[in-house]
Amino acid sequence: MPAGWDYAVTAMLRALPLLAVLVAAIAPPAFAEEVRCPPSLNVQAQPEAPGGWSPYPAKDQHAFAGAALVEGDRVAQMASPSLAAAPPALEPDRSLRRGRSEVRQWDFPAARRGNVFLICRYTGTQATLAMDLPRTVRRCQITEETDARGVILDRPAAPPQFLCR
């Protein structure tokens, strides 16, 4: 081995932790992943036919209608037969009216302990989609169309806009 080889290797090994700290310090911050409800939901409709009738299934497409954020165990709460509709939703941290729309916002701390999940609702069906929010999500917002009095419309001209990040 050439002279000084041991010294060079030792110096490089000592520099590695410092290099790792420098890379971590100058790397851009990790951004939270964006979570959105799918714009539509396809549902396989299986009719129950009364005596003498033959059922014929169909696939129906339903547009996004709204979202709810719920704290707790998604699997347990969504499977509970005691729920008439959906589990109780979290109240937004703030709400702001802008012209003919209302923006509601939920803020989540960086050290969130409990699980929060998202339920996406669709027009003309009781079928929903649900997923656990990644712990990197810090804020969710929904913007919905209102009437002149500020009441959210049941049948808006455009679907609500929903985003978590």
Image: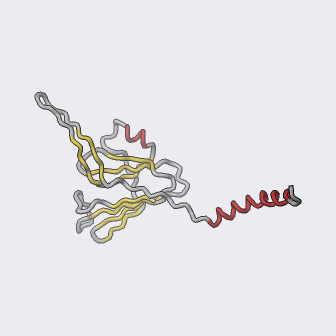
Q: Position of residue 85 (x, y in %)?
A: 31, 43
Q: Is residue 148 above or below residue 53?
A: below
Residue lying farthest to the front in this orientation: 1
Q: Position of residue 122 (x, y in %)?
A: 28, 51
In-front residue for pair 117/59? 59
Q: How is colour applied across the structure in the image?
A: secondary structure
Q: Is residue 2 left or right of residue 119?
A: right
Q: Is residue 3 left or right of residue 59?
A: right
Q: Is residue 137 above or below residue 49?
A: below
Q: Position of residue 22 (x, y in %)?
A: 68, 64
Residue lying farthest to the bottom in this orientation: 99
Q: What residue is drawn where x is 40% and y is 50%?
A: 118
Q: What residue is drawn where x is 30% and y is 62%?
A: 144
Q: Position of residue 78 (x, y in %)?
A: 38, 41
Q: What residue is drawn where x is 69% and y is 62%?
A: 21
Residue lying farthest to the top in this orientation: 51
Give the tally of numbered discs: 0
Residue lying farthest to the left in this orientation: 52
Question: Could you tell me which quadrant the N terminus lies in?
Answer: bottom right
